[in-house]
Every structure is written in structure tokens, then in C-alpha cells.
Image: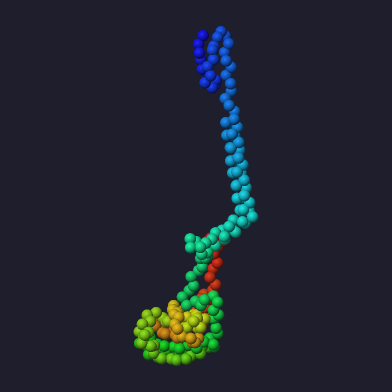
Amino acid sequence: MSMLTPRGLKGKQYRVTGNSYPRLGRPPRRARKVVMAVGGVLALGLVSVGGVQLYDVFSGKNKHSAAQACASPDASGKPLAAPEGSPAPGAAPANTAVPQPATVTVNVYNATDKSGLAARTADELKKRGFQVGQVGNAPSALDKKVPGTAQVLSGPGGLGAATLLVSQVGAATSTEDTRTDATVDLVIGDAFTALSDPNQAAAALAELTKPSPSPEPGHC
């Protein structure tokens, strides 16, 4: 006789006698059931998530989520603004109406060494319907200090008029000062030769007053 502890008998000792042997039990099935149950739950969860995503794609809800993401607050708690196109130089704000030339009074100043340039430019502006105020040499603060074609000066009440005047001069720049009326100053610079032709001026005005493009759906 011998004492054996076969595998599967959970550490119990049995006496082996003659031709009789202990019957080995099957491994426990509880662990297998737990594993199968967990696997089934995970598979069901993956199927559910995939179905929801497909539903969002075909129903368009993903665009709504993207729009909400664009408006989500940043670290400071302020909403993130959608990116907008940069306005062209001299463009009036969106809420500023561009007036008709007959309602705009322009002061024309010559900041160059070219004699008679202010007078000729003022005459051309009159032909285009503008009202002309003062005509003469530029003040000392700007005389010989405008390297480009021209500089347009206006107060807060003349932003629309400034945009209209900028469209008449190629590559002119616009600056806001503290004046309280709606007059605008056209200070002629070294690169100025003449006003843009009427067709070019109309195209430039359309570009300056064009609304900023809206961001594409799904892009912040």
C-alpha cells in the first residue's frame, strides 16, 4: 500500500489498495463561467458603442457635437470664438455702413515734393462725386513721412467714409484719429501717381466690404 496525492484531489490523501482507485473530479467550472460572462458583456458593449457612432454619423449629430466643441470654454472659462477671416486694410467694421460719395467731405493734403498733386487729386475726387474740403500741403507731422501711396485719416464717425476713400487709392492705409466729425483726410504719399480707375475702385470697395467667411462645419 502507498499514500498518493493525485492532482485534482485538492490535497487530500487516499489509500490505494488492490485494484480500486479514487475517481478524479473535473476542474471547477465556475471560473470558466465568470470568464465567459465578462467576455459577453465586453462584446455587447463594443457592439453598442459602434451602433451609436454609426447612428451619429448618419443622423448628423457629429456636426452638432463639433459645433459645441468650438464653443466650449477655454481654461479661463470664456467661450472659444470661431476663427474669422482677417479684414482687408481700411475695411469698415461689419456694422458700419459705407456712405455715398456725395455725403463724404475729403481734405486732400500733399506730403510729397510733387507740386500741384493735391489740387489735381481733389479735382478728380470732385468728378467722382466727393465733397472736397481743404486742399494743400500736409501738416509737418506727415510731410515727407508717407512712403506708400496714401494715408487716410478719419475719426470714429468717419470709418465708412474712410473705407470708401481707401477704395479709390490702391494700397492706401487707414488710420483712426480723435476727430469728432465725419470728415476724412487723404494724405498723398511718395508712391502715389493717380487715383484708381472707377472699375478698380468698385472692385476694391466690394472686397473691402465683403463679409468675413464663416468657418466650415466641423472645423474650430
For residue 30, what is the image quadrant?
top right
Question: In the image, is residue 179 above or below residue 40?
Answer: below
The residue drawn where x is 51% and y is 68% is 84
Q: Colour scheme used in the picture? A: rainbow
| Viewer-proximal residue among 21 and 131 | 21
Q: Residue 125: where, in percent of width, then height?
A: 49, 87
**Is 169 left or right of 95, judged from the image as shown?**
left
Q: Residue 183 at what x, y percent from top left?
A: 49, 87
Q: Where in the figure is residue 88, as x and y percent of width and height?
A: 48, 74
Residue 68 figure quarter:
bottom right
Residue at image point 60% right, 36% down: 37
Say if 98 sits above or below 53 in the image.
Answer: below
Asked whether 148 or 26 is in front, the reply is 26
**Residue, far top:** 18
Residue at 50% over, 86% down: 182
Q: Is residue 128 visible?
A: no
Residue 141's x, y, as percent? 36, 85
Q: In this view of the protein, which residue sits in the foreground, 62 or 216?
A: 62
Height in image: 201 above or below 80? Answer: below
